[in-house]
Each structure stands twice: as structure tokens, then as C-alpha cells.
Image (spheres, rainbow, N blue to C red):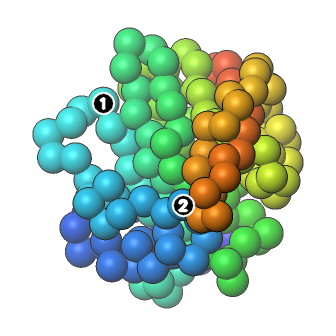
Amino acid sequence: MSDYTLQPIGDRHLTDIERIEQTVHIAPWSKTQLAPAQGCFDHHYALISQDDQIIGYFYARCIAGEAELLNLAVDRPFQGKGVAHQLLTLLKKTLVAAGAKTLWLEVRQSNYGARALYQKQGFELISHRAGYYSCPDGTTEDALVMRYQISSSHVL
């Protein structure tokens, strides 16, 4: 995986990120939601690329020691190849530097791949949120709330 490059997200990346977002998420974020917030020091964004092709990214925020993973995606051809693992490792290092003690996330109950990744990364299931996610057919899906206790010795 040494041929992957990690870098901050900028406006020039939005078209590629939007393409990935549209293909991997059931309810994708809009281009406006994907645009990095200007001047927000509590928001953290990064992408991973290979040969100048964006293959994954994350969006998170950290306020008063509490962090939340808002969005993480890996382009379909690169799923299952350790890219999400690298993104989560980078995220944890970023959050240690930001002073976070806890990282929270919600994941669709049906997203078995993401759930397995998060469990392997040390996240624990805390609770369910009934009907949290909207589905294209008008129904809803439960979210699983997961937590990771950040320790600099675990991620550095």
C-alpha cells in the first residue's frame, strides 16, 4: 500500500469525490455537503489517492474531545484492499492531534462490510437508532452507534 497518497481535501477534488459518493452510498451527500467547510477548525477531511486517482476519503469533526466520523467512502474497485483501514488509521492520528478522546459513528445496520471493518478497528457497539437512515424506496433503516476510545498508543 505504499503507492497510496494521503492528502487534505480541496475544492478541486469535489467532482471525483462526488462520483465516488454517488456510487457507494445509498443516500449520498450532495456536492454542497461534500465541500470542505472554510475556516472550521473542528472539521477534518482527507483523501487517499493512487496514481493521481482519488480512491477514498473521510469527513469528521472534533469538538471538546468528542469526535464523530461523518462520512467515509472507498471507490468500489478498491474496496477490500486495506484503503478504509488506512483512512481510519489516518483519522485516528488526526484526532489524537486534535485532542479527541472518543470517536463516534453511525453505520447502516445492513452495511456488513463497514461494520466488520469498524469492529476489527476496535469500535464497540453502543446502541441502535431506529429509523435513522432514509432509503430510496421511502422506508428507513436502523443505525448502529459505535464508539472507539482513542489512545495515542493505539494509533501512533
Q: How many marks?
A: 2
Of the numbered discs in the image, which one, if any, rests on residue 27?
2
Residue type, numbered disc 2: Ala
Q: In the displayed image of the protein, which residue is found farthest to the left? A: 39
Among the two numbered marks 2 and 1 on one chain, the one whose residue lies closer to the N terminus: 2
Please give left or right for residue 69 compared with residue 59 in the image. right
User: Residue at image x 77%, y 54%?
Assistant: 111
Residue type, numbered disc 1: Asp
User: Residue at image x 61%, y 45%?
Assistant: 133
Please give left or right for residue 124 compared with residue 96 in the image. right
The quarter in which the N terminus is drawn is bottom right
User: Residue at image x 45%, y 79%?
Assistant: 19
Between 87 and 21, which is closer to the camera in this rendering?
21
Between 76 and 44, which is closer to the camera in this rendering?
76
Which residue carries the number 1 mark?
42
Between 142 and 21, which is closer to the camera in this rendering?
142
Q: In the displayed image of the protein, which residue is found farthest to the front? A: 138
Q: Secondary structure at mark 1?
A: loop
Q: Nearer the viewer, mark 2 or mark 1?
A: 2
Q: Secondary structure at mark 2?
A: loop
